[in-house]
Amino acid sequence: MKNLLKAATIALLLGTVGATAPALAQTTGSVSKASQRSTETYSPEEIMAQGHQFFGKTSRGLGQAVEYIFQNQGEPTAYIVGEEGSGAFVGGLRFGEGTIYYKDGTTERIYWQGPSIGWDFGGNGSRVMTLVYGSQSPDDMHERFAGVEGSAYLVGGVGVNFQKHQDVTLAPIRTGVGARLGANIGYLKYTRRPTWNPF
């Protein structure tokens, strides 16, 4: 009888351990997925810190713009900081250059240029911070990104619009006059080297 009780107790203990093992494995898997996400993407706090450092005192409205982008797209896999110049008289041109930063430490110089069509007049130079979604390497970026119709957002002197090519989405943030929204109708071509050809 004692032996039967011992055997039953051991079986019960083994069954309990076996039942909790998958639960523990599941929990560990969730934690590791969350930490993996944090090593592959940038949090709102990280983007805000970089934005304030980059835009400085002209960053009024930056917080709302970043919040708007994160609500729409989530956490970016990379970001670009740079400067651009543009001019327009109904049809316009935009040229820029900057550096793209990935969470794994990869960085690369990148250039962009492209035409725009719309009710858009004037010229300007501005700083630009672009949040990048769906890109794991600079190679994904050397394409033409068309503006997403109706995606323009303007708050506190900061303008945002979305651009897309296949699975990669870009969200450029421009300050001041650089928030000219007429340039949303068009595309930007991102390249490894500077070029004067916007097409």
Image (cartoon, rainbow, N blue to C red):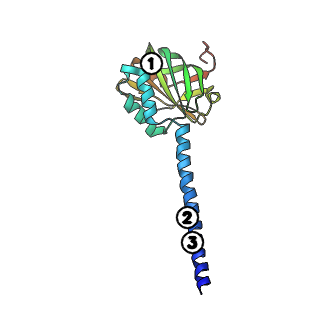
Query: SS class of the residue under badge 3?
Result: helix
The amino acid sitting under disc 3 is: Leu
- Which-is-in-front pick, marks 3 and 1? 3
Q: Position of residue 63 (x, y in %)?
A: 38, 31
Q: Quadrant of residue 174?
A: top left
> Disc 3, disc 1: CB below 8 Å?
no
The amino acid sitting under disc 2 is: Thr
Query: SS class of the residue under badge 1?
Result: strand
- Which-is-in-front pick, marks 2 and 1? 2
- Left or right position of 165 against 50: right
Read off the residue under disc 1.
120
Read off the residue under disc 2.
20
The amino acid sitting under disc 1 is: Asp
Residue 28 visible, this orientation: yes
Residue located at (36% from left, 20% from top):
57
Read off the residue under disc 3.
13
Q: From mark 2 to mark 1, how far is it between C-alphas? A: 64 Å
